[in-house]
Image (cartoon, helix red, strand yellow):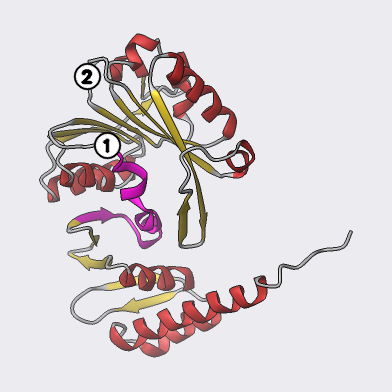
Amino acid sequence: MAYRLDPWSVPSALLKVLFSYLIYFVVRILFATNLREVFRIVLFGETGKLRLRHGFGTFTVNRNMVLLWAYLLTKGILVYEKAGKIYVSFNGGTVCTPSIDRISLLIEPYEKVYRIFDFSRKKVLDVGGYLGETAYLFHKWGASCVVVYEPDDVLSKHAELTLRLNGVNGRLHKAFVGEPCSAKSVDWQTVLNEGFDVAKVDCEGCEGFLLYVPDEVLRRVPYWVIECHDYETYRRLEEKFTKAGFITSFRAYYWSGVHCIISDHNKPSRDVLRAAPLIILSASHSFL
């Protein structure tokens, strides 16, 4: 079988490499104090210590972490260490993280993904709280209360600290939502009975259990943003929310390394959706 090479693939790959090393040199000159060690980490792919100027701390990193740290810096996201903890200066607030490799998600285009509704004075459900970064953003966008579900023991601990550091009004539950095989899971109907204005769902598969929630329970929440991790789940959820009386829209979401792309079209073709690694489904109604 002949392989057809895209004529732009080679220069594109070279530009990515050059861009990565340009970032590396910026970090090396402006921030790193142990330049020889950083050179060894980046050039030979070894693990070592990254010591930073200006009191930003010392990190054990590999090449990818160095480049990620530097890339985040170009986006105005600063990672630093204080009293043995790692913090991230993020969108005017502070996020606490257990390690640098956990912060790659902070480059996501949160405004495009989630800020499609007005959060002012809204009570928000955040399923899949991760480090508490979305809860902080909902608070920043005007939410009156944010209730977070994050089952991972390490992530939930840091998410709680993120909420406290940013004065977020709300609480965090260390639990799965809708996972019948887990002992520390809460079913969707119990969660939704609390009453919310907006629901954000990014839980790596638990969105599928919304298919078994009665329509009248779904309608208690007027606004939804759901990340669907496969086409079939998206198709069935879109059908269910539409039959329940919601107006739905959806966008394909792609990423390549540190680059995240969301389709501009609210109604992309079925082929585009099938190929997308993630589909953002939003739903709204005005019954209440």
Q: Quadrant of the N terminus?
A: bottom right
Q: Nearer the viewer, residue 165 or 201?
A: 201
Whether residue 40 is in magenta: the answer is no
Q: Residue at x 61, y 36 (%)?
A: 270
Secondary element at image label 2: loop
Residue 160 falls in which quadrant of the image? top left
Q: Which residue, given by chain and number where applicable, does mark 2 sit on?
A: 195
Q: Which residue, given by chain and number where applicable, does mark 1 sit on?
A: 117
Q: From the top left corner, tell me how far across and down residue 173 is, in percent.
A: 26, 30
**Total of numbered circles in the picture?**
2
Residue 264 lies, with reference to residue 224, above or below; the image says below
Q: From the top left corner, tell me how far across and down residue 12 is, in percent.
A: 59, 73
Task: Look at the image and give the residue range highlighted in magenta.
Answer: 94-116
The mark nearer the N terminus, 2 or 1, is 1
Residue 13 falls in which quadrant of the image? bottom right
Q: Nearer the viewer, residue 193 or 272?
A: 272
Whether residue 102 is in magenta: the answer is yes
Q: Residue at x 56, y 35 (%)?
A: 230
